[in-house]
Structures are given as C-alpha cells and as structure tokens.
C-alpha cells in the first residue's frame, strides 16, 4: 500500500483558504470583486466587529440561478475563463475559482441570490451545504459570511485588533471606490457609515470623499498615451505630501495592484519637487492589452508582471511631471484654524471601533508575542480624511497650515557657520548660459524687495501680500538648472588642467568597479587615469566645476559609483548637478545688499521651476493680504 493519497476536498479548500483568506478584508475583497464582475452599479458592505463576527455584501448585479449558486462554492468553479487561452487575456477581477470555496471552508455562509427569474437561498457551514430553499426574486446577490475562522483556531489566535482589521477593510474599500467611480459603494460598521460614494463616475468627487475636499482641490489631472498603454489619474501638488507611500493607488485594467516600479516612476515624476521622505497622494489608472499583463502571479492577485515596462514607466514619469510642473506656484500660508472640541456623537463613533479587550470576543484577543503594527502597513484614514464630508466630522479642521506641512517635512533654514562669498562673475555666467526651455505656466509674481531677515530670508511684497524667499534655496535652484545643462552634455573644450593632479587609492574590488564605470564618470566630467596598482589620478576637470570644491565633488561622485556598483548615467548626472549647485550657493546668515537681492530674484524668475530647490524644499512662500488682515482682526 502506497503512502501517497489524494486529499479530501474540504481539507484542500482549507489549505487554499490560507492563501486567499488572510483576514476579514480578504473576504471583503473577493466578494466585492465578484459583485463588480457581475455588473453591479451599487455595492453595500456591512461589517460587525470589523468583519470577524459578520460580513455582508449586497449588490444589484446579474445574480445566479440555483445551479450556478450551488456549483459556485466548489473549488475551481468559475464563469470568467473557459480555456487556457483565456488565461492570457483576463478582463475580470476574479478568474481562479478559489475564493468562494475557500471562504466557505472557514466560515458560515448565507447566500440569497436571483437572476430576476428565479431565486435561491443557500446556507453553508465549513464548506458543507446545510440547507437550501427558494429565495427572493430581487435581482442581485446578498451574501453574508459569519464566524470567520471558527474552525481554524490557529488563524483566529493571530488576528489583530478591531481597529487594525477595520483599517485594512477601509483601505481596501477606498481603493475600490477610486478604481470604480461609476459604482456607488457604501461601507458600514455597527450602523456607522465609513464610506459612501454616489457612483456618478466623477473621480474627483470620490477623492474628496476619501481624502477631503481641501486635498481634492489641490490635485492635478494628468493623462498620456503610448502605442501600448493609456494612463490617466490625479496627483497632489507638491504642497500636499504624506510620510507613507501607501497613499499612492495604482490600478491596471481595473485592478488595484502593488507595483514597486510604477510607484518609483510616480516618485521620480516629482524629482526636485518634494523633500526627501515625503510622498504624494496619487491615483493612476493604466489601461492596456490584457495580453501584456500577467495577473496569475499570486492567489491574492495584487502582484502583476508587465510587458514593455520601461516604456510604461517613461510615459508615467513624463506625463505626471508635465502636469505637476505646469501647476507649480508659491505655496500660500493660511491662518491656522482652531479646532473645536469633539461632540459626543463623534466620541461615541470612535468608541464603537475602540473596544476594551474585556468587551471583545475571545477569538479577538491578541497573543502576547504579537508584533506592533506599523502605521505604514495600511493607510487607515483619519477622521478628517475618511469622513470629512459627513455630519460626523463637523467642527474638525481638514486643512493643514503651511507651518504644519513645513514642520512635518523637516524644512530648516539651512543655517551654517561656513563663510561664503557672493561670486558675481559666476552669477553672470549662470545667467548668460542657461536658457529655460519654457516659462512656468504659473507666472512668477512681480516683486518689490523690502529687506532681509536674519541674513537668510529675503522679504518682498506685491499687491496680493508679501513673500519670503529662502536665499540659499533660490540660488540652489538657479545653479542646479545651470549645472544640469552643463553635466548633461560635457564639452571636451571646457577642460582645465590641474597644476597638482589629484590621486585616489582604492581596494582591488573598488578599483575594478571604477574601471567598469570609467565612461560613466567621464559623462559627468571625472576623467580617471590608472596610476599604479588600484590607484587613479585626475589631471583635469571641467572649467565649470565649483571653485575650491573640485576635489570634494570628484571624490563624492566616485563614492557614489562605488556605492551603486552599476552606474546609471542619468542618475549620476542628476546627483552631480545637485551636488555642485549646493556647494557654492549662498548660505544662511549671509547678508546681501538690495542690488544682490534684486539680481537673485531676477535670475530665479527665469528658471523653469522657481518654486522648489533641487531637494524639493520650497524656495518661496506667499502670505496673502487677506490672511494677514484676518490675523489683525481687520476682516471677519
């Protein structure tokens, strides 16, 4: 007698459930996606105890007859694909035929469905059909999943708190609403409405419902098209940022996915517009031939593989960058609003999802070894973001002042004790040689110099208020665009020989890396010659290298190549331009006369992007006259 045998169907379903059904939000995802595939225009999700007690999904889709309703709970039962060729052109969210079988194997399920002609009601427990009878003729499906993981206690033991599990579901529903603005979604938890969209197809209205009206107003539309892909979406202007990448939603052919490369292309589109460690709120829809997309990577269907990925990344970066650059302007400083005391209704709302462990069911108790949940795991909306437009959020402010944004982004005044000199000859050369490829869509304001604060900030005024300009950031932007142009096309005629050559010594491994990347270094003006074993000498450099910083810049560029091992010339050029622009820019605590300040603003005005420095910090901020008068109680 052999040792190998075929597993029981219900046992194999439980094993599959370990991949498909990780938590209550996984159940919601599968059921709502089925409702979307069924052609629903209205989907309601009702939760009890974040879904651990009950998950109910009601839709108005095509529904099922008796035969389909019974077979749908068998493993690999699906209406989405018929043969292996369909697997390469998947146009639906579901296709594996595992979800309902897996969910039913670890819970109790009540299904009421009808195709408009006949209706059936089915009750299952642990994957077994317990009862069936004729049901309502209302077209659509009403499916309730209760006592999730009742027969898999190991999974119950490691469920997180009510707040955490609810946060995952809210995050999921937010993304589905952003993906399908033409469907009316409603999410309810203990009779409290957490999300509701109207299904009118206006993505900006959905953004307002999820992230708040103030943030939705500060999002720009972008779109683009190539031979294989078409993209569209919304993204916040650089003034609005978050500390987590989880606010970036990516949808490919109507499917929410996690894709590092696409995420990177979005971030790269904001290059020099955002401070380090800050990310935009963005929603991007990508459409393309399903043949170019492989979604059969993981049972959760959140990881995909794309063909012609490089072309898509370039399309995203260029389209989004153009939209952001055309929307750039000086950020306005709004008066900080006072927040009122939360009402009893608001307090009670949050109490409903903040149970004490004594009131929670036994299966929700956290093990002593449970890891602390990182806030980056889910983008759990705050009150001001998820329910801002509802009566529940009255009295709460939803608009951050620039001071709050500035503090959160770590924007400093770059104070330094290093002595600096205003190099007039270099400034004239910068002004003469760089010509912007286009003027900003948002015109740079006509400003009158008033003075200087602490030798760091220039004060200027216009008819609409006054402006503060960070002198270091301003000159950094001016020189960055100059050096970017120079580094982008190194001229062999612009070389300067050194009286005393620079010598660099490295290990054997590092020397090998430098030999492999010698041409890339030449692209940025670093000319290495081998000088003995594992040593290199530099005998010349471009004439436009910042004076007195030549050796430091060459060494830092070499160090970057050694760190990356495989050099990207484009990135190396960018790093060189940023590095050189920072070295000789005016530092803080350096006092300028009026003529120097006027010339600085004149040069800044001609830049392609005069509003942020190469590191993404703001160059200029605007204090509106109206806000100033409000501070002094001149207006009400």
Image (spheres, rainbow, N blue to C red):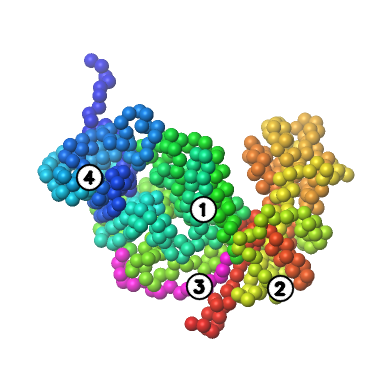
| Label 3 Cα crowd, 10 Å radius (few <14 / some 14-19 / many 20+) | some
Percent x, y of residue 190: 26, 59
| Label 4 Cα crowd, 10 Å radius (few <14 / some 14-19 / many 20+) | many
Please provide the residue range marked out in magenta: 331-349
Of circles 2 and 4, the one toward us is: 4
User: Residue at label 3?
Assistant: 336
Mark 1 / mark 2, whichever is N-terminal: 1
Q: Residue at x 34, y 72 (%)?
A: 343
- SS label for mark 1: strand
| Label 1 Cα crowd, 10 Å radius (few <14 / some 14-19 / many 20+) | some
Q: Spot the residue most to the bottom.
A: 634
Label 1 and label 2: CA atoms lie apart by 36 Å
Label 3 and label 2: CA atoms lie apart by 27 Å
Of circles 3 and 1, the one toward us is: 1
Does the image show residue 605? Answer: yes
User: Residue at label 2?
Assistant: 449
| Label 2 Cα crowd, 10 Å radius (few <14 / some 14-19 / many 20+) | some
Percent x, y of residue 486: 74, 48
Mark 3 / mark 2, whichever is N-terminal: 3
Label 4 and label 1: CA atoms lie apart by 37 Å
- SS label for mark 2: strand
């Amino acid at each position: 007698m052999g040792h190998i045998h075929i597993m029981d169907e219900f046992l194999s379903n439980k094993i599959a459930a370990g991949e498909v059904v990780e938590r209550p939000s996984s159940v919601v995802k599968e059921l709502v996606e089925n409702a979307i595939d069924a052609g629903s225009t209205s989907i309601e999700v009702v939760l009890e105890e974040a879904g651990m007690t009950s998950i109910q999904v009601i839709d108005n889709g095509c529904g099922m007859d008796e035969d389909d309703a019974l077979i749908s709970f068998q493993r690999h039962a699906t209406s989405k694909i018929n043969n292996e060729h369909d697997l390469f052109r998947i146009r639906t969210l579901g296709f594996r035929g595992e979800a309902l079988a897996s969910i039913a194997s670890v819970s109790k399920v009540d299904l009421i469905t009808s195709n408009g002609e006949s209706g059936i009601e089915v009750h299952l427990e642990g994957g077994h059909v317990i009862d069936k009878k004729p049901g309502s003729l209302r077209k659509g499906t009403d499916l309730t999943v209760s006592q999730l993981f009742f027969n898999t206690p190991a999974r119950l033991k490691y469920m997180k708190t009510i707040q955490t599990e609810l946060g995952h579901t809210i995050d999921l529903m937010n993304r589905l609403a952003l993906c399908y603005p033409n469907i009316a979604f409603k999410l309810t938890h203990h009779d409290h409405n957490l999300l509701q969209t109207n299904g009118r197809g206006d993505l900006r209205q959905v953004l307002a419902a999820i992230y708040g009206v103030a943030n939705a107003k500060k999002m720009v539309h972008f779109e683009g098209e190539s031979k294989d892909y078409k993209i569209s979406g919304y993204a916040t202007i650089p003034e609005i940022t978050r500390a987590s990448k989880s606010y970036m939603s990516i949808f490919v052919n109507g499917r929410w996915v996690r894709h590092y490369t696409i995420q990177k292309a979005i971030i790269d589109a904001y290059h020099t517009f955002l401070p380090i460690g800050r990310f935009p709120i963005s929603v991007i829809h990508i459409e393309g031939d399903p043949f170019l997309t492989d979604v059969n990577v993981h049972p959760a269907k959140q990881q995909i593989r794309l063909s012609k990925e490089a072309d898509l990344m370039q399309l995203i970066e260029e389209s989004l960058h153009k939209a952001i650059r055309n929307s750039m302007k000086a950020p306005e400083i709004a008066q900080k609003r006072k927040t009122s005391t939360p009402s009893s209704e608001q307090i009670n709302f949050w109490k409903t999802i903040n149970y004490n462990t004594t009131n929670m069911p036994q299966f929700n108790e956290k093990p002593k070894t449970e890891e602390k949940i990182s806030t980056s795991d889910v983008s759990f909306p705050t009150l001001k973001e998820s329910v801002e437009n509802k009566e529940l959020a009255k009295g709460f402010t939803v608009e951050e002042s620039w001071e709050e944004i500035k503090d959160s982004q770590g924007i400093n005044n770059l104070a330094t004790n290093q002595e600096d000199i205003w190099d007039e000859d270099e400034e004239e050369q910068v002004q003469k040689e760089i010509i912007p490829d286009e003027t900003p869509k948002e015109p740079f304001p006509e400003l009158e110099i008033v003075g200087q604060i602490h030798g760091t900030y220039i004060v200027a005024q216009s008819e609409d208020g006054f402006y503060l300009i960070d002198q270091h950031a301003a000159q950094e932007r001016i020189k960055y665009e100059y050096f970017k142009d120079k580094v982008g096309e190194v001229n062999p005629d612009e070389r300067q020989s050194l009286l005393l050559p620079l010598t660099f010594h490295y290990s054997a491994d590092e020397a090998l890396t430098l030999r492999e990347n010698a041409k890339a270094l030449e692209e940025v003006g670093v000319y290495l010659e081998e000088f003995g074993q594992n040593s290199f000498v530099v005998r010349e450099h471009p004439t436009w290298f910042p004076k007195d910083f030549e050796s430091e810049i060459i060494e830092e560029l070499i160090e970057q190549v050694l760190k990356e091992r495989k050099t990207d010339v484009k990135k190396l050029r960018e790093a060189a331009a940023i590095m050189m622009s920072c070295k000789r820019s005016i530092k803080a605590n350096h006092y300028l006369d009026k003529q120097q300040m006027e010339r600085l603003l004149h040069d800044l005005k001609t830049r392609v992007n005069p509003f942020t420095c190469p590191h993404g910090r703001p160059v200029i901020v605007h204090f509106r006259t109206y806000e100033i008068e409000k501070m002094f109680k001149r207006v009400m």
